[in-house]
Image (cartoon, helix red, strand yellow):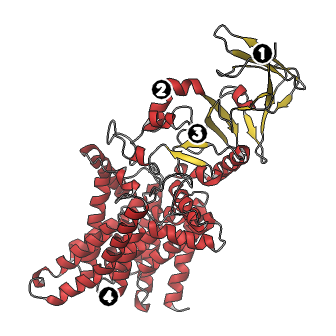
Amino acid sequence: MSPSLLLWSLCCLLVGLGAFGLWPYVSDDALISLQYARHLAEGVGLIWNPTDAPVEGFSNPLWVLFEAGLISLGMAPLRVARALSMTGAVLLYRTATPGRPERTQTAVVLMVIMASALPFSVAAVAGLETTWVAALALLAARHHRNWRGAAALAALALLRADGLIFVFGAILGVVGSKFRQWIWDSSTRKELFRLVLPACIISILWFGFRGWYYGQWLPNTVALKMDLNIASTLRGAGYVCSALAATPLLPVLALVTLARRSLTPVERVALTMVSVWLVHVVVAGGDFMPGYRFFVPALALFALIAHAEVKRLMRKGPVWAMILLALAVGQIGLQTRDPLVSSQRFEAIVPPCAALGQSLAKMAQQQDPLIAVNMAGCLPFFSRLRALDMGGVNDRHIARSPIADAGSGWASHERGDGVYVLKRQPDLVQFCGPQGAVEPCFASGKELKGLPGFVDRYRLVQLQIHRTSRALVYIRVDSPAFGVARTETGWRVQPWLIAGGAGPVSQLTASGSMRLPIKAQQRLVWTLPEGVGPVTAVQQSGVRIDILPRSDGRQQLTLNAQIDTTLTAVQLTVHRP
C-alpha cells in the first residue's frame, strides 16, 4: 500500500472511531443551518420562517448553500450535514500530515495525537462546518504562496461570517515573514494581492447580497455579540484557557517548535492566523456548546506548527513514538473531566425532538401555530411549524435588545425580551433544552415567566414523547391547535391541559392525537379560561366529568376516574338555559 493511500485510510479510520462513541450527538446549530438549507432547496428562500421577513440567522453561508444543493438532489438533510462534517474531518487530518514516504511514521503519530483531542471528533459528528473551517485554514497557511491558499481563504470568507479573521491573519503572516523586504520587494506585494483578492471579491459580493436580500449589512448572529465588554472578554479568555487545559499536547509541541528555532514562512503564517483567531474568540466571549468548536481551527493550526517537533522526536528513536502515543492516551483521560467534552454533554437530541416535533405538526394540522423555543434548531426543524427564537439568533428584535447583565450569562444567549415574546402570543413555549424545563434558562424566558399574562394564559404540560423521554412545555390555553378550540357546538379541550404539569403524563401518539392515561379513583381539577362557558361536559366512558361554577364567574372542570382508562379530547357543549 502506498504511503498516501495508507494515510488516507488511517484518516478515515480515526474519524470513524472518534465518531463511533459520539454518534448520537448533533449540534442544535446544525439544525438551524439545515432549516435554511431545506427552505432554499424547496424554493421557499434563504429564510427561517417561510411566512416571516427574511433574517440571516446562520453564520455559515457557503455551508448552507452546499447543504441546499445536496438536499435538492433528494438526500436526507440530517445525513447531508453529518456526511459533510465527517468528510471535512478526513480532509483536516490529511492536510495536517504531509504524505512523503520518509514522513509516514511522523504523520501517523501526529494523526493519533490529533485524534486524542476530542474536539476534532465532536466536530466530525456535530453536522457543522467546523472541520472544514479548520481544514481550509490549514490549506491557506500551507499554500499561501499559490492559488490553493487563495482559494482556501476565499472559501473561508464565505464559509463563516467571521472567516475574514483568517484572511487578516494570513495577511499579517505574509507581511511578517517578509517584513524586511516589504518596502523594496514588489513581488511580495503581488503575492499578497493574489492571496487575498479572491476572498475580498467573495466578501463584497455576499455583503451586497445580504444588504439586498435581508435589508441589513451584518448577519443577525453578529448583532447578538455587538455589546463587547470586559466581563464577556474575561469569559472568552476562560474559554480559551479551558480548551488549552483540556487539549494541551498540540499547543505544547507547537510552543516547543517556536522555542527551538526560527519558524518557516508557512509556520509563521499559521502562527499569526491562530493568534488572530484566538484573540477573536476571546473578544467574542467564547462559547458554551460542547466540544470547544471554536478552538478546533486553532488546534489544527497548532498541529501544523507541531509537525516539525514530532518529526524531530521521531528521529531520536521509537521510544519517543511510544512516549508521544502515551501522552495522547493521557490527554483523552484528561478530557473526561472537562465539562465541555465529557460524555454527559453529548445528549441525543434527535429522537425526542423528532418525536415531539412530528406529533405537534400532525396535531396542529391547518392551524399554523407559533412555537417559542430556546433551542432554535431542534423543534422547529422537526415540526416545521412557525417558530419564535427566544434567544434572538433568528429574530431581529431580540438580537438587538439590550443585555441586562452582559458577560454573566451564556455566550451569544444573553439577550431577551419577554414582553415581546408574550405579544407574539405563541401557542407553545419550551424553555431550555429539547426536553424543556419548568424554570427558564435564558433571558427571554426569565422575563416571560414572571409576566401576569403568561401566568394567566399558559399551563405547564408534561408529555411522554419517546420511549424513555419526557418533555415539559407551556401551552396557551386558548390555542386553537393545542388548547381549548372552538367547535360548532361548544369547545374541545385537550386532555394535557386538564392534567397539567403535576398530574398524569400525557402521551402524543404517532398520528398526532393526545391521550391521557388515568388510574381508577384519580381526580383532576382545572378551571376553564375566561370566555369559555357556560358549558356542560359530555359524559365519557369510565370518567365522570362535572362542571361547577366559581365565585369569579368562571367554571371549574372536575374529572373523576371510575376505572383505569384513557382520556382523549373532552367535548364541552354550550349550556342552553
Q: Quadrant of residue 42?
A: bottom right
Q: Is residue 405 left or right of residue 118?
A: left
- Return the mark for residue 515: none
Determine whether 129 is above or below 221 in the image.
below
x and y, in percent, of residue 299 in the image:
37, 67
Return the disc, 2 or 3, that comes first in the chain's sequence: 3
The residue at which mark 1 appears reads as: 547
Could you say whether the residue bearing mark 2 is in a helix, strand or loop? loop
Label 2 and label 4: CA atoms lie apart by: 59 Å
Q: Comparing marks 3 and 1, which lies closer to the viewer?
A: 1
Looking at the image, how many numbered discs can be counted on the residues? 4
Q: Specify whether residue 96 is in view.
A: yes
Q: Specify whether residue 324 is in view.
A: no
Return the disc, 2 or 4, that comes first in the chain's sequence: 4
Amino acid type of the residue that numbered disc 3 sits on in the rendered structure:
Gly
Label 2 and label 1: CA atoms lie apart by: 30 Å
Task: Estimate how packed mark 3 is, as few (under 14), some (14 to 19) or many (20 or more) residues with alpha carbons within 10 Å.
Answer: many
The residue at which mark 2 appears reads as: 450
The residue at which mark 4 appears reads as: 146
Labelled pair 2, 4 in contact (Cβ < 8 Å): no
Return the disc, 3 or 4, that comes first in the chain's sequence: 4
Q: Nearer the viewer, residue 228 or 102?
A: 228
Q: Quadrant of residue 144?
A: bottom left
Q: Comparing marks 2 and 3, which lies closer to the viewer?
A: 2
Label 3 and label 1: CA atoms lie apart by: 32 Å
The residue at which mark 3 appears reads as: 436
Labelled pair 4, 1 in contact (Cβ < 8 Å): no
